[in-house]
Image: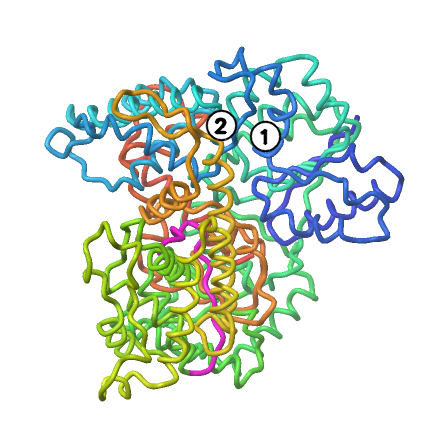
Amino acid sequence: MTITFITGPAGVGKTGRAVETLRGWLTNNIPANNILVLVPQLTLAQPYRDLLRDSQLAGAGTVDVLTMNGLALKTIDLFWPLIAAPAGFGRPTAPPIFLSIETAQYYLQQAITPLLRQGYFDPNVVPLTISLPRLMSQILDNLNKAALMGLPHTQVGQRLAASVALEPSSRVALEHTQACVNRFREFCLARNLLDFSLRIETFDRHLWPVAGVKQFILNRYRYLIVDNIEEDNPFAHRILRDWLPKTAESLVIYDEDAGYRIFLGANWRTAHKLSDLADDTIRLTGSHVAPPLMLELGRRAARILGVDVAVQTENLDLEAKAEAKQDQDISKSSAIPNNQLPITNPQSPISNLQSPLDPRVVMTFEQQRFYPQMIDWVVARIAALIKEDGVSPNEIVVLAPFVSDALRFSFANKMEQLGLPARSHRPSRPLSEEPAAKTLLTLARLAYPHWQLLPEPFDVTQAMAQSIAGLDLIRANLLTQVVYRPHQKPLDALANIDILYPFEQIEGNIRDRISYDVGVKFDRLRTWLLGLQNQADPPVLDHFFNRLFELLSQPGFGFHGRQESGEVVANLIDSARQFRQVAEQVPLAAGSNGQDDVRLPTIDELNRAYLATIEEGIAAAQYIRSWDAAPDEAVLITPATTFLMSNRPVDYQFWLDAGSSGWWERIAQPLTHPYILTEDYPASRPWTDADEVAAQQDRLYRLVVGLTR
């Protein structure tokens, strides 16, 4: 038994060493099915996947790369007959049904709707106005964090109320939250539905403690690699504390000054305690990706925030000094001029630390009066880097605390005007708010008018502009006015009418204003939609979206050549398929009599339910393809924390709106708390303003240090 704990800053080669360890195990004929790679989220496993594609490594394809949640799911599925009844599931002879974040929200809404109708979270009683998606997100957060810290779900409200200073009326909100938590858990147990929290709790309480189950896992996975342990949760750390000493060989990797996934339960403190088990602790230094000047910038920024970060370039040897001098020379001719730097005060904390390196050489501070001017400046600098200095667009990233629709649109539009490629990545954004997804959802409503879910004219206008290449919003609005006729017959006759009027029958100058070419494309789209209405059996939505994308991706239509639209549509298809595969197994929700319908939903009912659910604006599931590097070169705009979790170094970063409080303040979550609901926070200890400020500074220091490595 050998446990090796590798620690060090990001970029020093820890994962590279783990990949070589994995290669060595496979080369030395260790059975691949005895090897497990554990990561906090699957998007961090790309280096291991790349290795396992090597055809020269025998059996590499059978190495499991999982999250702890994935391991729990596989184990529950395997041992379900053993634990279904003891764990309290209502249908122990039926198979388990595993929920994604999207299907969990669908069933949570069904579970708590009766409570909401009874007046729960009524603004007249609770001093809180909250949308349904945000309410559901925080209820699920409470369940998830309780499971990860080993707290019974029935005690979440009590734990929060004991630590957060609240008015009596606010305590009522926590009581309502607790009632919703309890109702959802009862709902899931009765129907064999396992959301994330119930998977973790079932594994933790009913599988891992069983000697036979534990021994099965220990015998199966005797060689363990655990990467980015600081981004994982206390549940994973508890299991690993019991598991690691029983492995034949294991490697644990810890990133110093990281731990960005606090809102998802990450706890770097409990992660670091695993080093106590190590037979050998190795600390790597010397970044493979960041120059000394950039590392020095992060070190000094951390010092300002009260944290001393160790110097990676040990003793500042001659090679490092030469590299720093080279960086200075390059910066003088860079497309990002440094002459606007306002840091001229010799007492500045950035410039006053004792070091031969001056980090201002690699930093430009540009202040603009208005937000659009800031975006103009950034785009101009990017254009100079690409066109004059020959920098690859893939080596440029634009970061902000949050990337709003307005920011993404403004940035993408200005980049397009200059002929520069750009893409965005916002994994927490609801799918229904992505223009490409919204287009397909709107066209689905038009294809099946008998659902009585006809879209608003504004949505049809947007869908037409997205669907037909070269169609601007003004002509799209004009087209909608003349062809979209939703109210020409009563609703009960909708199935027998054409909601969309053919363009070829339009006469007069309005036809010329829209243009013949646009009209031909519209009629082709209309004919395709009518063809679906005439089918005896309607297709399920994931098939509908797939076939519709085949049309819209052809030349002359809006998705042709647009990679980001294709990615969004692929995610939407996956979402609809996963929803269908779950919902088709579950009897219809309880009716007015409180009893579930004995029949399963029809295809029409499934399609309508998915549309209604996704258009509520629910949080999207995680789709790995969205995290993969784009095959075509493009400048990326993304939230800063999302970029850090992608483990992708670049040469140039633009930090937008650097004075925004969003860089350090946490999102307002009045019904949950990421710091109180963690394993090592003392129960009943009040959360004070001083705690909040300390947490803000800690978040900011980790963010800045992470971005400069």
What residue appears at the point 31 percent right and 46 percent down from the top-left corner?
Answer: 616
What residue appears at the point 49 percent right and 36 percent down from the top-left corner?
Answer: 582
Q: Mark 2 and mark 1: span between their CA atoms? A: 9 Å
Mark 1, other Cα within 10 Å: few <14 / some 14–19 / many ≥20: some
What amino acid is labelled 1 in the image? Leu
Q: Quadrant of the C terminus?
A: bottom right
User: Which residues are drawn in magenta?
Assistant: 418-433
User: Element type at marker 2?
Assistant: strand
Residue 426: in magenta span? yes
Left or right placement of residue 214 versus residue 198 in this view? right
Q: From this viewpoint, is residue 302 visible? A: no
Occupied quadrant, residue 104:
top left
- Residue 73 numbered tag: 1
Occupied quadrant, residue 3:
top right
- Residue 140 numbered tag: none
N-term-proximal mark, 2 vs 1: 1
User: Element type at marker 1?
Assistant: helix
What amino acid is labelled 2 in the image? Leu
The correct choice, above or below, for 346 with respect to 150 in the image is below
- Residue 194 numbered tag: 2
For the residues labelled 2 and 1, say whether their Cβ atoms are less than 8 Å apart: yes
